[in-house]
């Protein structure tokens, strides 16, 4: 076993989940997924594909019709972006999209800069490739988090091969502004740094926008800029278990990325790609409903949390999480374990996402029934009153 693999830290989120799974009295909000099943129209498309015998290999970069549909979907969301099918590659999940991008760009010894707190996979992936990872932490201000832009730009130099940025952010809900994106892109052009933008939460954005999504680097980038954007069907189409994602990348990289997919997964399964096509065909009825429901969930949970004495929280502009701090409780892993065992409440510990998030907790508010959120806050408040 390579030492870097042996030394990888196991998921702290999984550790909490493993402690609570199988206990029916535990309200689980630890994973980043809704408890609502995938819509019927998507599941039926997969069933029809299987029943018709589509059980064989497909093209490395995805079915041509799916690549075209994704290009159209991208242009709808980002009209200024020059994206056609030859800039799209289909992947077996958003995780695979991100890992493929890192494999394509990072050599052992290269420098990668990552904005944290962040989903731990984004730090692990360049680490697996032997990169030197430098983290630039967001700054907490009250219950919200913000970017130290001058500090980030100072960290990115000609030695920086790759910048990884996740916005809207998991776990904090922080979202890049258009001005911040412009300054980052201009700076990375000067340093020759690639940008890997994890924008899987772009549709889960709760501020008014013309095209129903968060600001994207695609809105301001040129087709051959050193930019890869990772997406997933998981969140805004309720398809976490399907493992369907895609990359938007410079057309000059598509063929090489196809070779890399061949050596990783060969291709995404056809029946899941048929499901993805159905999701896109019904996007105007599925995603707006999901986003509106998640906004209702956010607006149910956050005020209730804010009213609990000792809780520091701010409503996230995007994503599906409330990220909050409990005054007087500095060890988030210990608190998360105690909440499972003593309150029947399953949350993700903040230090799973970065050392600077120690003492914070992540609550996934994507609940089919918002009354579960109300009950969860009741349990938290009751637990705190006993301390």
Image: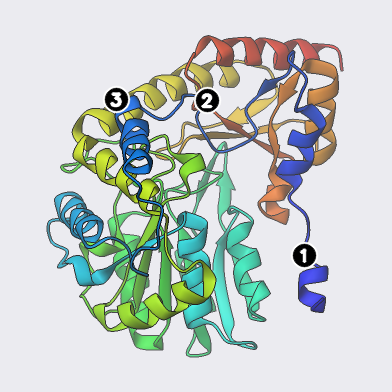
Quadrant where the C terminus sits is top right
Q: Nearer the viewer, residue 87 or 142?
A: 87
Q: CA separation, marks 2 and 1?
A: 29 Å
The secondary element bearing badge 1 is classed as: loop
Q: Picture quarter containing residue 291?
A: top left
Q: CA separation, marks 3 and 1?
A: 38 Å
- Residue 152 circle label: none
The secondary element bearing badge 2 is classed as: loop
Q: Earlier in the sequence, mark 2 or mark 1?
A: 1
- Residue 35 circle label: 2
| Mark 2 or 1: the one toward you | 2
Q: Nearer the viewer, residue 114 or 269?
A: 269
Check disc 1 and report the residue beneath it. Answer: 8
Q: Picture quarter containing residue 68?
A: bottom left
Q: Nearer the viewer, residue 156 or 366?
A: 366
Residue 131, given in percent of the width and then of the height, sits at 63, 81
Check disc 3 and report the residue beneath it. Answer: 289
Quadrant where the N terminus sits is bottom right
The coloring applied to the image is rainbow
């Amino acid at each position: 076993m390579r030492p870097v693999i042996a030394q990888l830290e196991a998921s702290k989120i999984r550790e909490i989940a493993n402690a609570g799974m199988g206990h029916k009295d535990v309200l689980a909000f630890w994973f980043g997924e809704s408890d609502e099943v995938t819509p019927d129209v998507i599941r039926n498309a997969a069933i029809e594909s299987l029943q018709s015998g589509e059980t064989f290999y497909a093209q490395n970069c995805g079915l041509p019709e799916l690549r075209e549909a994704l290009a159209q979907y991208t242009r709808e969301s980002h009209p200024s972006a020059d994206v056609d099918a030859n800039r799209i590659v289909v992947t077996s999940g958003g995780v695979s999209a991100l890992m493929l991008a890192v494999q394509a760009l990072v050599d052992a010894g290269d420098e990668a800069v990552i904005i944290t707190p962040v989903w731990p996979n984004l730090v692990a992936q360049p680490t697996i490739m032997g990169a030197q990872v430098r983290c630039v932490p967001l700054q907490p201000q009250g219950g919200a988090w913000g970017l130290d832009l001058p500090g980030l730009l100072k960290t990115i130099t000609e030695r920086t091969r790759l910048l990884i940025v996740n916005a809207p952010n998991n776990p904090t809900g922080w979202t890049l502004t258009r001005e911040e994106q412009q300054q980052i892109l201009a700076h990375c052009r000067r340093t020759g740094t690639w940008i890997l933008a994890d924008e899987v939460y772009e549709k889960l954005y709760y501020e008014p926008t013309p095209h129903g999504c968060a600001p994207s680097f695609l809105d301001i980038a040129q087709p051959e800029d050193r930019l890869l954007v990772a997406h997933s069907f998981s969140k805004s189409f309720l398809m976490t278990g399907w493992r369907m994602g895609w990359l938007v990348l410079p057309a000059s990289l598509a063929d090489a990325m196809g070779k890399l997919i061949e050596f990783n997964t060969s291709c995404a399964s056809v029946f899941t790609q048929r499901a993805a096509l159905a999701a896109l065909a019904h996007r105007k009825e599925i995603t707006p409903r999901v986003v509106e429901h998640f906004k209702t969930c956010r607006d149910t949970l956050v005020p209730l949390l804010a009213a609990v004495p000792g809780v520091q929280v701010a409503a996230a502009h995007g994503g599906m999480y409330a990220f909050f701090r409990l005054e007087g409780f500095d060890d988030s892993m210990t608190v998360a374990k105690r909440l499972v065992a003593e309150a029947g409440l399953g949350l993700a510990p903040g230090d799973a996402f970065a050392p600077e998030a120690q003492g914070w907790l992540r609550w996934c508010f994507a609940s089919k029934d918002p009354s579960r959120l109300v009950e969860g806050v009741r349990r938290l408040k009751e637990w705190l009153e006993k301390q």
